[in-house]
Image (tube, grey):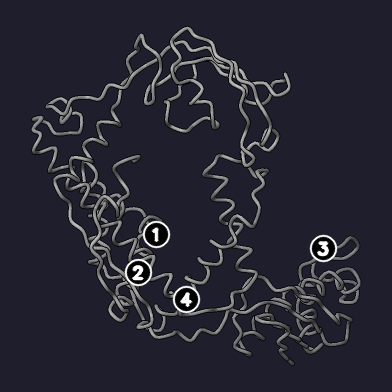
Amino acid sequence: MQVSVETTEGLERRLSVEVPAERIDSEVQQRLKKMAGSVRLDGFRPGKVPMKVVQNRFGEQIRHEVIGEVLQSSFYEAISQEKLRPAGRPEIEPTSMEPGKSLAYTAVFEVYPELTLAGMDQIKVERPVTGIEAADVDRMIETLRKQRTTWEAVERPAQDGDQLVMDFEGTIDGEGFQGNKAEGARLVLGSGRFIPGFEEGMLGAAAGEERTLDLQFPEDYPAQEVAGKPVRFKVRLTAVEEPKLPEVDAEFARSFGVADGDLDSLREQVRENMQRELDQTIKNTVKNQVMDGLIEANPIEIPKALITEEISRLQEQARMQFGGGADMKLPDEMFTDQAERRIKLGLILAEIIQANQMKVDPERLRSTIENIAAAYEDPEQVVKWYYSRKDQMSELESVVLEDQVVDWILGQAQVTEKETPFNELMKVGEGA
């Protein structure tokens, strides 16, 4: 078998392969002989069909099957011989398939890039350092109170922070449009849920009052058919409700699983949860910097075929997340940057793992599962569940191995620490 390789552009390769006619003809004859011993044809006893008849009847079909199989097998022999690592499916084009002549074809494909890792000491990481103060716990409990907000009708004009219950209808040039009206709609003033001017236009309104608001949809409004157009809303306010936050008392504590209603126990539970979230946030912050540093220190060209495949995966994930079917069109450009980042990191991390012969640490895997389980009512059951699910364990093993790579890099990288307030790091508090 003759093989030659040509670099066409970047990572693209053109492989030319010529398979001797004898290999094809020999396999075809073997299959025809085997068939002759069992084939049934009218006018002949089983196993007594002349070879010439079998060849005339089935020769072309058998040759077609053999060529298909030889194309596939010889391609893998050729890339093994030339030490090539194809990325994506090859485009194979036969150039000679005539009986009695060599089978010749070209295969065009991209290859994985050759990777020479840069020194990990080039990577700079700033690790946030923070603690949880009593004021941070106070803010978190206040956030929990807001999550348990109830609403109580009031007989006064609406003000910022109130919830309105209303019926409305919008028209553009006197005509309705999709989603232009609703009954019993609820809106918290100051939430920014409606288009600019709507909430401001309802300030000071009282239950039973009707108002007409002449507004305009933003130019970047998601529904393109109304974006930038003037709209008139007729609104009838049926109720004004003010927020009522629960008292931080024993009943409040019990609602969060503190059986005896002790507020100190509630604060300790809240602090423990905050600490878990803090540890995870610091870990993610450091990990993202490591990944950014890896990409910056190791610029690589990536195969277009892999980008296309990854974009397709991301599009499918988005459709599942938003409940869209196969007909939900999502432009490739939405996912290109994310796809390229994933592929680059995948290639770099795989090279590090292979070069250092890294394997998943069983103790670290167990610890990771136990940390996840700690947030549940029956942690031991959660641990057992993970160990009984191969698919879940496989995902966690990948995560743990990636974390081991990050720690290995941090052992060589330029790591500094920065004091950061908990509130700033976690982005909680006002507006949370």
Image quadrant occupied by the C terminus: top left
Q: CA distance from mark 3 to mark 2?
A: 59 Å
Sequence-wise, the earlier of marks 3 and 2 is 3
Sequence-wise, the earlier of marks 2 and 1 is 1
Name the amino acid, label 3: Arg
Dot 1: what SS?
Answer: helix
Q: Nearer the viewer, mark 2 or mark 4?
A: 4
Q: CA distance from mark 1 to mark 4?
A: 27 Å
Sequence-wise, the earlier of marks 2 and 4 is 4
Which residue is at a point 54% across and 45% down the rendered structure image?
Answer: 320
Q: CA distance from mark 2 to mark 1?
A: 10 Å
Sequence-wise, the earlier of marks 4 and 3 is 3
Q: CA distance from mark 1 to mark 3?
A: 53 Å
Q: Nearer the viewer, mark 1 or mark 4?
A: 4
Which residue is at a point 45% across and 84% down the rendered structure image?
Answer: 117
* Residue occupied by mark 2: 401
Rendering coords of residue 19 (x, y %): 77, 87
Is residue 404 found left or right of 311 in the rendered image? Answer: left
* Residue occupied by mark 3: 40
* Residue occupied by mark 1: 395
Q: Residues within 10 Å of mark 3 (few under 14, many from 20)?
A: some
* Residue occupied by mark 4: 296
Dot 4: what SS?
Answer: helix
Residues tagged 1 and 3 counted as in contact (Cβ below 8 A): no
Rendering coords of residue 32 (x, y %): 80, 75
Q: Quadrant of residue 147?
A: top left
